[in-house]
Amino acid sequence: MRPPTVLTSPNHDARPSGMPIDMLVLHYTGMTTGEVAIGRLRDASAKVSAHYVVEEDGRIFQLVPEERRAWHAGVAYWRGHRDINGRSIGIELVNPGHEFGYRAFPKAQMSALVDLAAAIVKRRRIPARNVVGHSDVAPERKEDPGELFEWERLAGAGVGLWPKIRKRWFGGRSFETFNFGPDEHHQTIAQAQKNLVAWGYDVPTNGVLDARTMRTLVAFQRHFRPSNIDGRLDGETASRLASLLEQV
């Protein structure tokens, strides 16, 4: 991997003393071009930044030293922690996003990201379950890097995890028979909510498929079941979640 080009951003501060760097958060820029995005990430008045930006042609730019806290996650939560910026490294992938013409991530960009992310995960000893998208840590606000991002390819390179699909049972019924809609209440919903919490999300565990839980299910599906991101709790979604928990 070629060394990244350094384009310093003023938007960073000191990490909290003693806090580990144990997360990798992936974003898309959601702006018309990479140049525009980098300009904003380097604009002191914008008060946003990331450690790295990966262009569509595979070029990598470093805006903030890894030892410093970049301002990329905003109000967020993962596995009991809320200062996600303080414990994470943030990577922005140049992509117009859902607002400006969301599209697939080019091969050159993904190849560069795989190399960069694999090096970071190894160097920082980041647990696989802590490789997340912006939508995972802020499911009620964000949807990036989105359903076209190749999470399975990244996991295949040792960065993050991907569910292993097999038939499962709960309460004597196959998971595949479950399909709950909004505001339904059921013990299976409560179990799925507990599993979402165990994986890292912040949801109630009251057995009600409320709006917050459904938005979190959308985030989970964007990451682990991108072919169908309807926010409903069905057997396939529950099965994929259970598979991930078995891997940690």
Image (cartoon, helix red, strand yellow):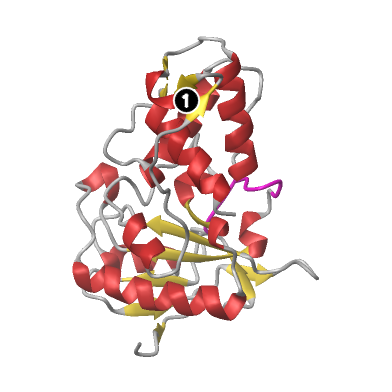
Depth check, front residue: 79 or 240: 240
Depth check, front residue: 248 or 227: 248
Residue at 26 percent of width and 38 percent of height? 227
Depicted 154 relative to depicted 59: above or below = above
Residue at 36 percent of width and 72 percent of height? 114
Magenta span main SS = loop
- Secondary structure beneath label 1: helix
- Residue at the farthest front position: 172
Residue pointed to by mark 1: 214
- Residue at the farthest bottom position: 2
Q: Is 134 displayed left or right of 54 in the figure?
A: right
Which image quadrant is residue 236 in?
top left
Asked whether residue 76 is drawn in magenta, I would say: yes
Asked whether residue 244 is drawn in magenta, I would say: no
Percent position (x, y) of residue 116? 41, 77
Which image quadrant is residue 248 in?
bottom right
Give the class, few, some or many, for how many residues have Cα within 10 Å of label 1's Cα (few <14, many ≥20): many
Residue at 49 percent of width and 39 percent of height? 241
The reply to whether residue 73 is visible in this rendering is: yes
The reply to whether residue 65 is visible in this rendering is: no
Which image quadrant is residue 85 in?
bottom right
Q: Quadrant of the N terminus?
A: bottom left
Q: Is 203 displayed left or right of 152 in the figure?
A: right
Percent position (x, y) of residue 115? 37, 78
Depth check, front residue: 106 or 121: 121
- Residue at the farthest top position: 184
Depth check, front residue: 204 or 86: 204
Depicted 205 relative to depicted 246: above or below = above
The residue segment tinted magenta is 72-81
Q: Is 2 displayed left or right of 65 in the figure?
A: left
Residue at 44 percent of width and 42 percent of height? 142
Percent position (x, y) of residue 77? 62, 45
